[in-house]
Image: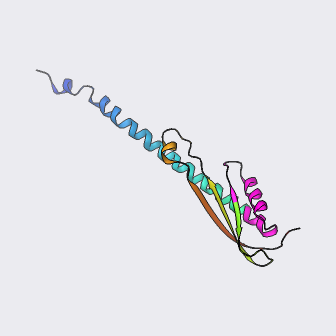
Amino acid sequence: MIGPSRRCRGQSTVELAAVLPVLVILTLLVIQAALVGRDRIVLTHRCRAAARAAMVTPTNAAATDAGKGAASEGSGFVAHLEGRIAVGELVTVGCRQRLVTGLPLVGPMLGDPEVTERFVVRIESVGD
C-alpha cells in the first residue's frame, strides 16, 4: 500500500507552477502602476513649469518649451493656454502627455494612457 506522503509527492511543485505566472503578472502590474504614478507626478511638475512661463510669456510655444525643459523623462508633452491673453487676466494652462507603459507582458496589455493636468494662473506681462 502506498502511504499518504508518497501520493502527495510533487504536489507543491505543481501548485507553485500554477500560481507563479499569476504572481509574476500581478507584480508587474503593481510596478507598472507605480511607474504611471511617477510619470503623473512628473507631468504635474512640467505643467507647473509651463504655467509659470505662461505668466510672463503667454504663448503655447513658451509654455510647452518650459514644460519640456522641466523634466528629461517622457515625450509628447504639449501645453496650451485657454482664456483671454491680457495682463491681469486668468488663463488656464492645460497640459497633456502620453505615458509609455513599457514593462514586458503588462505594458502592451494596458496600452499607453494619455494624462492631463491643468493650472490656472494670472498673466503678469504679455512678453516682448
Q: Residue at x 49, y 48 (%)?
A: 110
The colouring scheme, among rainbow, by chain, secondary structure or one colour, is: rainbow
Residue 75 lies within the magenta run: yes
Furthest residue to the bottom?
88
Q: Residue at x 67, y 49 (%)?
A: 75
- How many numbered marks have been drawn onto this rendered protein structure? 0
Residue 3 position within the rendered picture, expressed as x and y whole percent measured from the top left: 15, 24
| Residue 119 occupies quadrant | bottom right
Furthest residue to the left?
1
Residue 106 position within the rendered picture, expressed as x and y whole percent measured from the top left: 48, 43
Boundaries of the magenta span:
50-78
Q: Is residue 61 left or right of residue 99?
A: right
Furthest residue to the top?
1
Query: What quarter of the picture does the N terminus occupy?
Result: top left
Q: Nearer the viewer, residue 57 or 71?
A: 57
Note whether 41 is above or below 128 in the view shown. above
Q: Nearer the viewer, residue 51 or 98?
A: 98
Note whether 56 is above or below 98 in the view shown. below
Query: What quarter of the picture does the C terminus occupy?
Result: bottom right
Note whether 127 is above or below 1 in the view shown. below
Q: Residue at x 52, y 50 (%)?
A: 33
Note whether 89 is above or below 112 in the view shown. below
Residue 122 position within the rendered picture, expressed as x and y whole percent measured from the top left: 75, 75
Q: Residue at x 81, y 77 (%)?
A: 87
The kind of secondary structure the magenta stretch mainly shows is helix
Residue 110 lies within the magenta run: no
| Residue 124 occupies quadrant | bottom right
